[in-house]
Every structure is written in structure tokens, then in C-alpha cells.
Image: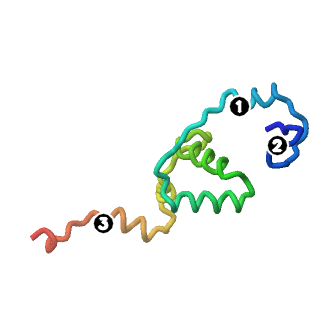
Amino acid sequence: MPAMSGGDSRGKRHENVDLHSLYAYNANMKQITIRKVPDSGVERARGLAKEKGIPLNDVFVQALESGLGLTGKALTNGLEIFSGDSKFGTEWDRYLDDDLQKIDPDVWK
């Protein structure tokens, strides 16, 4: 975001007011209010903001983008690590193909 020049009411100084850039930056941004955010979520977000050295708002925007699948990364439930062929060896494969297919007559009584 472009910086501003001059002072504000709190005495902070900024450089290079470029209102056209500032308007262009904010033109496609929307502001919303989210109510009833759990305290644990706010605490976690504050921790992440401090850890990353970024504004709290950026943490929430990133979380929103990630949660809605807007980052370009596929949404996942984390179970993909269990998919595909097993790498447990031939003994496991034999168990799956043979032993697991057998019906135990005592179980079906």
C-alpha cells in the first residue's frame, strides 16, 4: 500500500501521498464485519500476526482466502496421505489379498 506524507492527529509522519494509487489499491477491496468470533480464534490470529510480523487484518484475510479455497491450492481433509498403494511390503499385500478375504465362521454364528 502506498505511504502518505504529512502528519496525522497522533503525530505520526508518512511519506509520499499518492491518492490515485491509494484509491486504486482500495477500489476493489470490500470491508465486512464478522461477529461472534471465538476468543480462541482471535488469540490464535493475534499470535500468528505477531509471529509473522503482519497486521491482524492480514491474518484474517489469509485465513478467509485459504478457507474458501481462493489461494489456488486444493482444499484437503488431510487424508490424502493414506491414499494410493501401500508400501508395507509383500507380507501386508498378501494379508490384504488372502487373509483379509477369508470369512471366519465363528464370527458369523
Where in the figure is residue 100, as x and y percent of width and height?
Answer: 30, 66
Q: Residue 57: x percent and y percent? A: 65, 48
Residue sitting at x 14%, y 74%: 106
Residue at x-position 71% and y-position 31%: 26
Residue 100's disc number: 3
Is any atom of residue 84 visible in this view? Answer: no
Across and down, in percent, residue 85 comes to 48, 57
Question: Contact (CB < 8 A) between labels 3 and 1?
Answer: no
Q: Residue at x 80, y 44 (%)?
A: 9
Q: Residue at x 46, y 51 (%)?
A: 36
Whether label 1 touches label 2, CB < 8 Å: no
Mark on residue 63?
none
What amino acid is at disc 1?
Asn
Which residue matches tag 1?
26
Q: Amino acid at mark 3?
A: Leu
Q: Nearer the viewer, mark 3 or mark 1?
A: 1
- Name the colour scheme: rainbow
Residue 40 lies, with reference to residue 66, above or below; the image says below
Of 95 and 31, nearer the camera is 31
Circle 1 SS class: helix
Which residue is disc 2 drawn over?
Answer: 8
The numbered mark, 3 or 1, whose residue comes first in the sequence reads 1
Q: Nearer the viewer, mark 3 or mark 2?
A: 2
